[in-house]
């Protein structure tokens, strides 16, 4: 039964690919049924009605045993519920959002593939299986980000996402090989990992594995693909940001925490990477004008939080935030998508304004999502962020202050985009004619808004599910600091953008995203270009000229020189012949 | 005056061979070169006969008959070539016959 989780979306993707690409209705029906089946299966698993199936041996060699199996521990069950639930809502929402797109048959097939790959990551029992689905996530994100491939920017963004991920995946693969080489198994087996304990390879293996997370979960320095991935259709952004792709990195860290915890040095690197990513992304988000880009950077920032939590050994906090974030980020993206749908894909918040009055449902749900993300008390984001801050305060106080600053910035930029986009007067023609989106888009929004409110409360039981113990000593500093941060951020946002009709403060450094893209253009691309030029030179001159043509030249030179002897003079031939014969005689009888 | 020894014959044969070779190398006329070739062949014949005589074996002389036969055939073919070459080119000078030169 549990195999349905993987098989349903895979079969759906296959069916759509071979048969229904040009039949949107059939494709929608197949894909949504598949995602509903996976969701129901996930519920069944969570309730304990469905057991994990026996593993199938896939590769069984001496020293390498790879199984295709399912891990269904509490970590996986929670993740399954969240991913399949959000994915199902996104499928439904896509019905409305993609209603007019001629390519939507293909779209739903690719969604199914994406879902299947993500579920594969969640249930995998060993590194190899995870790596396979890991790469499948990469492929399907490539397909979906580049869904509107006739737009150059979308095709470029898809390529960028794929390549940035490849860089990280390369490290991940090396990490897997290191683990296998030292522990002799590829299974997620904490007992086997003891072979690494005290080994100098432990931090290296941990950091290499972390590389995979840097790529997938968009941590600095491989984050550049995430904002560009906004080129894909909005449901895809919601899926990538909430349920499938970026969550995979954090989930993977939690899954392999038994390796990471062997090396405190690696944990600190991870924590600092997360902290810096959270802060930098929040700073960039304050100056973006594209509503989806702001959300993209906010995702990056929240992922930074989760990675930070993992680095502080707080996997429970990380998973908690991952889950609540999944709900409200999907909500935010779908709310933004609803606005874009009404405004004919106008993404600049300065060209919106007053949308809130025309689209009350979208406004209300988006507002709840934004409040949850900002960490306003009473909503899910508050609880999970609190947990992470608490973890950070206990193990790495410096990072706690960074995280608190990030929380203030988060409240600030979420206030900014909400106020600018939804309140005030309409600033463009399209904004005046905005209409509320259809119900098929509205209902998922309402459900997610509900989840975004309640998911954090103890009665919802995420933390309990993860098996968290109530820690006795909770410093009061943390709630105080985070509340102050949120209030500061909200006030600054409200004061700064309450009645703004255009940007008041322009900070080029932040607006240009810390010049990451430019720096990459200059360094990596230049370096590559120089290296390519050097290789071209070697190819042209050393190999082409010197070896190939040089060899030919030597032979033909020899020929030319010998030709001089063949002058056509008979007497000369006779002379050389006699000389040669004399020489041979001398050689034979000379002694 | 002592008796004529094998050494005498061999020296004479060597001289004849050298004269023939010099003729082939130095002279320009194909006809003369031909005659010099014949001298070289006969120098070889002379030494063969001398060896045969002094070692009391008949084999050397048998070989001489072969050489004479082959030389006769060669002269026939060579002279025929020369005549037809002369008809075509109106010359028998070696350096003017360069049709095969690259």
Image (tube, rainbow, N blue to C red):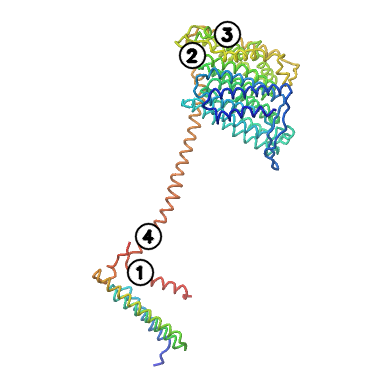
Cα distance in 3D space between marks 4 and 1: 16 Å
Q: Nearer the viewer, residue A207 or B81?
A: B81
Chain under label 1? A
Q: Is label 4 or label 2 in front?
A: 2
Residue at the disc numbered 1: A573
Are dots 4 and 3 on a single chain? Answer: yes
Are dots 1 and 2 on a single chain? Answer: yes
Disc ID at residue A343: 2
Cα distance in 3D space between marks 3 and 1: 107 Å
Q: Is residue B38 above or below residue A566?
A: below
Residue A135, x across and y down, in percent:
59, 32
Residue at the disc numbered 3: A491
Q: Is residue B65 above or below residue A372?
A: below
Chain under label 4? A
Residue A414, x across and y down, in percent:
57, 13
Q: Residues within 10 Å of mark 4 (few under 14, many from 20)?
A: few
Q: Is residue A493 above or below residue A303?
A: above
> Which of the two discs, 4 and 2, labels the residue nearer the N terminus?
2
Q: Nearer the viewer, residue A160 or A454?
A: A454
Are dots 4 and 1 on a single chain? Answer: yes
Under circle 1, the secondary element is helix
Chain under label 2? A
- Give the quarter of the image for residue A402: top right
**Does residue A26 appear anywhere in the picture?**
yes
Residue A241, x across and y down, in percent:
59, 22
Q: Nearer the viewer, residue A58 or A456?
A: A58
Residue at the disc numbered 4: A561
Residue extending farthest left: B90
Are dots 2 and 3 on a single chain? Answer: yes
Q: Is label 1 or label 2 in front?
A: 2
Q: Residues within 10 Å of mark 3 (few under 14, many from 20)?
A: some
């Amino acid at each position: 039964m549990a195999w349905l989780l993987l098989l349903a979306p895979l079969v759906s993707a296959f069916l759509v690919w071979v048969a229904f690409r040009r039949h949107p209705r059939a494709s929608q029906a197949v894909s949504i049924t598949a995602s509903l089946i996976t969701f129901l299966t996930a519920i069944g698993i969570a309730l304990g009605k469905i057991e994990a199936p026996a593993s199938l041996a896939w590769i069984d060699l001496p020293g390498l045993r790879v199984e295709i199996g399912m891990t269904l521990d509490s970590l996986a069950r929670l993740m399954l519920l969240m991913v399949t639930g959000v994915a199902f809502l996104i499928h439904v929402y896509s019905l409305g959002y993609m209603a007019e797109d001629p390519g939507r048959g293909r779209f739903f097939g690719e969604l199914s593939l994406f879902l299947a790959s993500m579920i594969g990551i969640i249930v995998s029992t060993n590194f190899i299986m995870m790596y396979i689905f890991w790469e499948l996530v990469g492929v399907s994100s490539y397909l979906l980000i580049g869904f509107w491939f006739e737009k150059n920017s979308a095709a470029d963004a898809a390529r960028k996402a794929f390549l940035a991920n490849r860089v990280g995946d390369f490290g991940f693969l090396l990490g897997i090989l290191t683990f296998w080489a030292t522990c002799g198994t590829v299974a997620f087996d904490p007992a086997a990992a003891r072979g690494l304990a005290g080994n100098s390879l432990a931090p290296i293996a941990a950091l290499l594995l972390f590389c995979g997370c840097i790529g997938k979960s968009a941590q600095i320095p491989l984050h550049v693909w995430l904002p560009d991935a906004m080129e894909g259709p909005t449901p895809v952004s919601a899926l990538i940001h909430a349920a499938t792709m970026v969550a995979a990195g954090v989930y993977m860290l939690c899954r392999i925490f038994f390796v990471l915890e062997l090396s405190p040095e690696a944990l600190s690197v991870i924590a600092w990477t997360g902290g810096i990513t959270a802060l930098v992304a929040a700073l960039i988000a304050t100056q973006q004008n594209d509503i989806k880009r702001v959300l993209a950077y906010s995702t990056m920032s929240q992922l930074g939080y989760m990675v930070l939590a993992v680095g502080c050994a707080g996997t429970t906090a990380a998973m908690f935030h991952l889950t609540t974030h999944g709900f409200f980020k999907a909500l935010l993206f779908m709310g933004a998508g609803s606005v874009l749908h009404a405004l004919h894909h106008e993404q600049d918040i300065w060209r919106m304004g007053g949308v809130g009055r025309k689209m009350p449902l979208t406004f209300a749900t988006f507002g709840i999502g934004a409040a949850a993300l900002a960490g306003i008390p009473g909503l899910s984001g508050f609880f999970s962020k609190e947990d992470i801050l608490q973890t950070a305060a206990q193990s790495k106080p410096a990072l706690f202050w960074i995280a608190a600053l990030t929380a203030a910035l988060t409240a600030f930029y979420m206030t900014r985009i909400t106020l600018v986009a939804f309140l005030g007067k309409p600033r463009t023609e399209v904004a005046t004619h905005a209409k509320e989106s259809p119900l098929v888009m509205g209902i998922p929004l309402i459900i997610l808004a509900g989840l975004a409110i309640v998911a954090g409360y103890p009665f919802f039981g995420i933390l309990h599910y993860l098996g968290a113990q109530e820690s006795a000593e909770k410093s009061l500093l943390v709630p105080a600091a985070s509340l102050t941060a949120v209030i500061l951020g909200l006030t600054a946002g409200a004061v700064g953008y309450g009645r703004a009709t255009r940007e008041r403060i322009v900070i080029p450094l932040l607006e240009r995203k810390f010049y990451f893209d430019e720096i990459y253009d200059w360094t990596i691309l230049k370096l590559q270009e120089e290296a390519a030029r050097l290789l071209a030179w070697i190819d042209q001159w050393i190999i082409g000229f010197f070896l190939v043509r040089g060899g030919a030249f030597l032979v033909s030179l020899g020929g030319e020189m010998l030709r001089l002897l063949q002058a056509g003079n008979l007497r000369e031939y006779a002379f050389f012949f006699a000389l040669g014969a004399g020489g041979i005689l001398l050689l034979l009888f000379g002694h | 005056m002592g008796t004529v020894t094998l050494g005498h014959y061999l020296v004479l044969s060597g001289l004849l061979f050298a004269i023939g070779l010099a003729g082939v190398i130095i002279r320009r006329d194909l006809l003369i070169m031909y005659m010099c070739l014949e001298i070289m062949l006969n120098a070889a014949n002379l030494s063969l006969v001398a060896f045969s005589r002094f070692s009391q074996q008949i084999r050397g002389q048998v070989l001489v008959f072969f050489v004479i036969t082959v030389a006769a055939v060669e002269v026939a073919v060579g002279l025929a070539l020369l005549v037809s070459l002369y008809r075509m080119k109106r010359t028998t000078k070696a350096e003017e016959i360069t049709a095969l030169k690259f």
